Image (cartoon, rainbow, N blue to C red):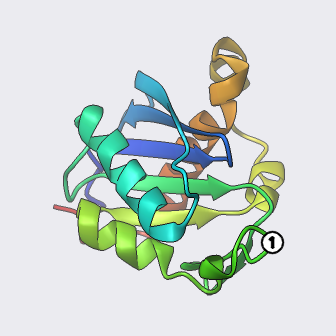
C-alpha cells in the first residue's frame, strides 16, 4: 500500500528568484512564497536558501515530497545538476542528495520536458495561480505524480 505524503512541494529556481508552492496530499493548495535567489548564486548557498525557505513555510518532514525545477539546466542521472553556463561550481552537483539529507524528504529534479509531457494537470488550478508561481505549482503536481507512479512506499 502506498503511503500518502504529508505535503507536496514545488520549487522553481531562477537566477533572480525562487518560487515555492505547497499542497497537501489531496491536491489542496496551502501556501506559496517567493524569495530572492542567493548572491553569490552557487550550489551551497542555494541549498541553504531552499532549506530556509522550507523552514519558513514549515515544510520539514520525512513524508514530504519536493520537486525542483531549474531553467536551462542539463540533468544527469536525475539527481545531479550541471549548470556550467552559470559557474564552474555548478558542474555535476549532487543537488538531490544535498537536499534530501538536509530536509529529510524525497526530492525529484524536473526538466522542461516534464512540463510539456503532462497533459492532465488541473488547468483551472494553474490558471487561478499567479503567473509567477505557475511553474512551482506544476512542479508540486508532477512530483506527487512521479512518486505515486513509482510506488514510493518508504515514506514515514
Q: Residue at x 53, y 46 (%)?
A: 11
In this picture, residue 139 sits left or right of residue 88: left
Residue 140 horizontal/vertical position (percent): 52, 43
Count neighbours of disc 1 (C-alpha within 10 A) and say few if under 14, some if 14 to 19, many if 20 or more: few
Identify the residue at horizontal 39%, vertical 78% (top origin). 97
Q: Residue furthest front?
A: 40
Q: Is residue 153 visible?
A: no
How many numbered discs? 1
The quadrant holding residue 136 is top right
Residue farthest toward the top in the current orientation of the protein: 128
Q: Does residue 75 sit above or below 114 in this rendering? A: below
Q: Could you say whether the residue bearing mark 1 is in a helix, strand or loop? A: loop
**Where does the image place residue 52, in percent across and percent down from the top left?**
31, 45
Which residue position is annotated with label 1? Answer: 85
Query: Along the line of sight, which residue is nearer the eye, 126 or 32?
Result: 32
Residue in the image at 43% along x and 68% along y: 44
Q: Is residue 72 above or below residue 78?
A: above
Horizontal side of 76 relative to 18 (left or right) equals right
- Name the residue rendered at 54%, 61% in the picture: 146
- In the rendered image, the quadrant that contains the N terminus is bottom left
Whether residue 131 appears in this view of the structure is yes
In-front residue for pair 38/24? 38
Where on the picture, by quarter, is residue 156?
A: bottom left
Residue 151 point in image, percent of width and height? 41, 69
Q: In the image, residue 18 lies at what x, y percent?
A: 56, 40
Amino acid at each position: 500500500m502506498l503511503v500518502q505524503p504529508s505535503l507536496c512541494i514545488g520549487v522553481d529556481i531562477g537566477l533572480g528568484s525562487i518560487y515555492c508552492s505547497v499542497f497537501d496530499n489531496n491536491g489542496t493548495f496551502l501556501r506559496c512564497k517567493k524569495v530572492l535567489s542567493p548572491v553569490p548564486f552557487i550550489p551551497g548557498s542555494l541549498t541553504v536558501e531552499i532549506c530556509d525557505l522550507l523552514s519558513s513555510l514549515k515544510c520539514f518532514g520525512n513524508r514530504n515530497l519536493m520537486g525542483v525545477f531549474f531553467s536551462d539546466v542539463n540533468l544527469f542521472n536525475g539527481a545531479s545538476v550541471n549548470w556550467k553556463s552559470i559557474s564552474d561550481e555548478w558542474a555535476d552537483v549532487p543537488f538531490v542528495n544535498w537536499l534530501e539529507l538536509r530536509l529529510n524528504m524525497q526530492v525529484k529534479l524536473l526538466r522542461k520536458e516534464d512540463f510539456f509531457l503532462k497533459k492532465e494537470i488541473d488547468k483551472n488550478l494553474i490558471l487561478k495561480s499567479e503567473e509567477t508561481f505557475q511553474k512551482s505549482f506544476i512542479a508540486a503536481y508532477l512530483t506527487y505524480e512521479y512518486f505515486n507512479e513509482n510506488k514510493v512506499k518508504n515514506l514515514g
